[in-house]
Image (cartoon, rainbow, N blue to C red):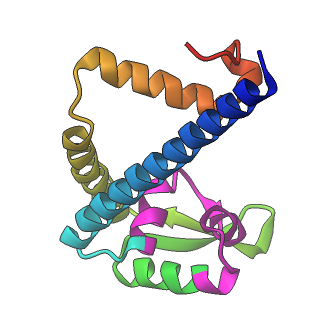
Amino acid sequence: MSPNADADAGTEADAVVADLSGLVFEVTGRLRAQFNAAAAELGLPPAQALVLTNLAGPAPMRELADWLSCEPSNVTGIVDGLERRGLVTRQPAPGDRRVKHVVLTEAGEHKRRELRSRSHALARTFFELPGPDQKHLRDLLTRVLTGPSAGGDSESG
């Protein structure tokens, strides 16, 4: 292969990567907008909805700040709002009473199920592809997220 052919192949590969990046950002933006719409239908600001839907168990405020990529003081305001709605409580951490864990209440569990159901219904319409295409897209995205060492060869085709 000539040097120009290598350069052309590199330029084409760069264009494909740029297209992929743009498409993934657009898909992410649309999914985020749909999630935010589902949250708004339930009267939740997006940040509160994110905490609510992803709070799997008691979690320290610091962990929520890390997950949301924000300062702990921002998390305090988000949790205050959820607490005022009766969706979470703050409880002392076992072993260190200075650390507060955020815990879903029964109402919070119910609201979380409702939010997940609504956002899943919107995602289902967004990814309206034939079943095999959905599975193929899922598998490709999984390979991207797990990295090249877990996904097999790096050749296209």
Foreground of the two, 15 or 136: 15
Residue 29 in the image: state x and y as whole percent.
40, 59
The N terminus lies in quadrant: top right
Q: Choose top left, top right, bottom left or bottom right for residue 84.
A: bottom left
The C terminus lies in quadrant: top right
Residue 11 in the image: state x and y as whole percent.
65, 39
Residues in magenta, as a range: 47-74
Residue 122 in the image: state x and y as whole percent.
22, 49
Q: Choose top left, top right, bottom left or bottom right for residue 95.
A: bottom right
91 sits to left or right of 105 = right
Foreground of the two, 97 or 139: 139
Above or below for 95 versus 89: above
Above or below for 121 versus 80: above
- Residue at 39% x, 72% y is 46
Q: Choose top left, top right, bottom left or bottom right for residue 45.
A: bottom left
Determine if the magenta segment contains residue 55: yes
Magenta region, mostly helix, strand or loop?
helix
- Residue at 56% x, 47% y is 18
Number of numbered labels in the structure image: 0
Foreground of the two, 26 or 100: 26
Determine if the magenta segment contains residue 119: no
Foreground of the two, 8 or 141: 8
Residue 65 in the image: state x and y as whole percent.
66, 71
Above or below for 23 versus 3: below
- Residue at 45% x, 73% y is 47
134 sits to left or right of 79 = left
139 sits to left or right of 155 = left
- Residue at 24% x, 76% y is 43
